[in-house]
Image: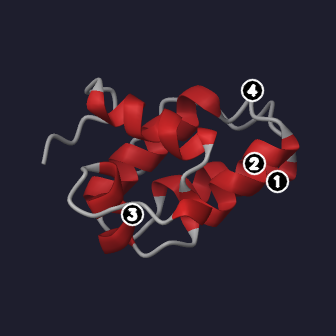
């Protein structure tokens, strides 16, 4: 069970892959944060924003979780508009993990 509430039927192959990977990160906490964010935004991302989100997917869960929850400073090369939107999404409680 993934938890996704979004169908991938209307998505192109790249977006389908990103959506799947967002929900299959390795830790349930990051599945919820990344997956729910992707459910909402994957259809509207530009190609450049998809690039930024794919880079975030490659970050180890422990590091990304620390950045999102302000437990560690976000490196400048990851501090993109997509990351800031993800962080805001989580801060608003929409990522459903309050850690």
Q: Are marks 1 and 3 in contact (CB under 8 Å)?
A: no
Q: Is residue 4 among the parts visible in the rendering? A: no
Mark 1 and mark 2: Cα distance apart in space: 9 Å
**Tag of residue 64:** 3
Q: Are marks 1 and 2 in contact (CB under 8 Å)?
A: yes
Percent x, y of residue 92:
29, 23
Residue at the disc numbered 2: 50
Mark 4 and mark 2: Cα distance apart in space: 10 Å
Q: Residues within 10 Å of mark 1 (few under 14, many from 20)?
A: few
Viewer-nearest of discs 1 and 2: 2
Q: Nearer the viewer, residue 5 or 51?
A: 51
Mark 4 and mark 3: Cα distance apart in space: 22 Å
Q: Is residue 76 among the parts visible in the rendering? A: yes
Residue drawn at the location 75% of the way across and 26% of the way down: 44
Residue drawn at the location 57% of the way across and 72% of the way down: 58
Relative horizontal placement of residue 69, taking residue 59 as reference (left or right)? left
Residue at the disc numbered 4: 44
Comes first in the chain, label 1 or label 3:
1
Residue drawn at the location 75% of the way across and 34% of the way down: 45
Give the color scheme: rainbow, by chain, secondary structure or one colour: secondary structure
Viewer-nearest of discs 4 and 3: 3
């Amino acid at each position: 069970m993934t938890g996704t509430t979004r169908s991938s039927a209307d998505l192109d192959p790249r977006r389908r892959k990103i959506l799947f990977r967002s929900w299959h990160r390795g830790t349930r906490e990051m599945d919820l944060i990344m997956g729910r964010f992707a459910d909402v935004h994957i259809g509207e991302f530009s190609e450049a924003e998809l690039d930024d989100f794919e880079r975030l997917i490659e970050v180890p869960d422990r590091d990304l979780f620390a950045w999102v929850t302000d437990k560690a400073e976000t490196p400048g090369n990851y501090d993109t508009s997509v990351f800031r939107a993800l962080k805001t999404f989580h801060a608003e409680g929409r990522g459903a993990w309050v850690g």
